[in-house]
Image (tube, helix red, strand yellow):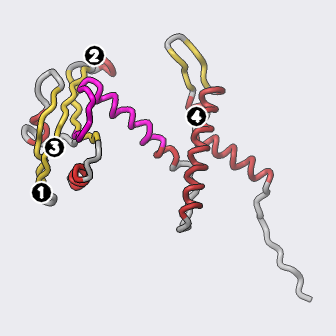
Amino acid sequence: MPVIRWLKALNIRFILPAVIRGKTGGTRALLRGRKSYATHYSLNSQLHGTVSCQMRVVCRYHKGRHGRHGVQYFLYVVHRVKVALHQLFEQYRERFGIESSYRIKNHCRIRTTSKNPVLRLLFVALAFILVNLWVYLLWVYVSRSQRGGRVVFRQLLPLKTMLEFLSRAVERHFPVVTAIFLPLST
């Protein structure tokens, strides 16, 4: 709630997924009907107080996907967003790719305790370059076109394997120091 209050105070546009709480009351009480709708709601917390906000309840149908049937509800807190209800789910879902990229980037980011922001930004940029290289290699060399789209065989070249290949290549050009010899005293 402090985040919602802060974003509203700055008048920043946002779409946030809302947590569905309660057995019959709370935000779960909003999950009714078979059509998507917009409503006002007051989020209450003993610790953070109350904040009123715009809520969007989006209904999607399973249509037998993954062996499920019936309505699936998605609940969003929105502010200054002009997106049709039927497009809201896809609009938020696009954010997932960004969040996934950041999560994947952490697998190949150089860890440092340096306080130098330029060095830290360089390491993040290198991590994103490595992730993009991996995606390119998967798309060009580890996939096949077929009817209905392209099939990527991601399990054949996981990111960790590509990083191991790069590490071995660097070690061949710059051998690892395995012993240190002290000079003879004269």
Cα–Cα span, label 3 and label 1? 13 Å
The amino acid sitting under disc 3 is Cys
Task: Please report contact status of discs 1 and 4: CB closer than 8 Å, yes or no.
Answer: no
Mark number for residue 49?
Answer: 1
Cα–Cα span, label 1 and label 2? 40 Å
Q: Earlier in the sequence, mark 1 or mark 2?
A: 1
Q: For mark 3, what is the residue?
A: 53
What SS does tag 2 mark?
loop
Q: Earlier in the sequence, mark 4 or mark 2?
A: 2
Q: Main secondary structure of the magenta part?
A: helix
Mark number for residue 135?
Answer: 4
Residue lying at 12% horizontally and 34% vertically, measured from the top left = 39
Residue 90, given in percent of the width and then of the height, sits at 34, 28
- Magenta stretch? 77-101
Q: Nearer the viewer, residue 172 or 32?
A: 32
Of all residues shown, which one is farthest toward the left? Answer: 25
Q: Quadrant of the C terminus?
A: bottom right
What SS does tag 1 mark?
strand
Query: Callout 3: 10 Å neighbours few (<14), some, many (20+)?
Result: some
Left or right relative to 131: residue 181? right
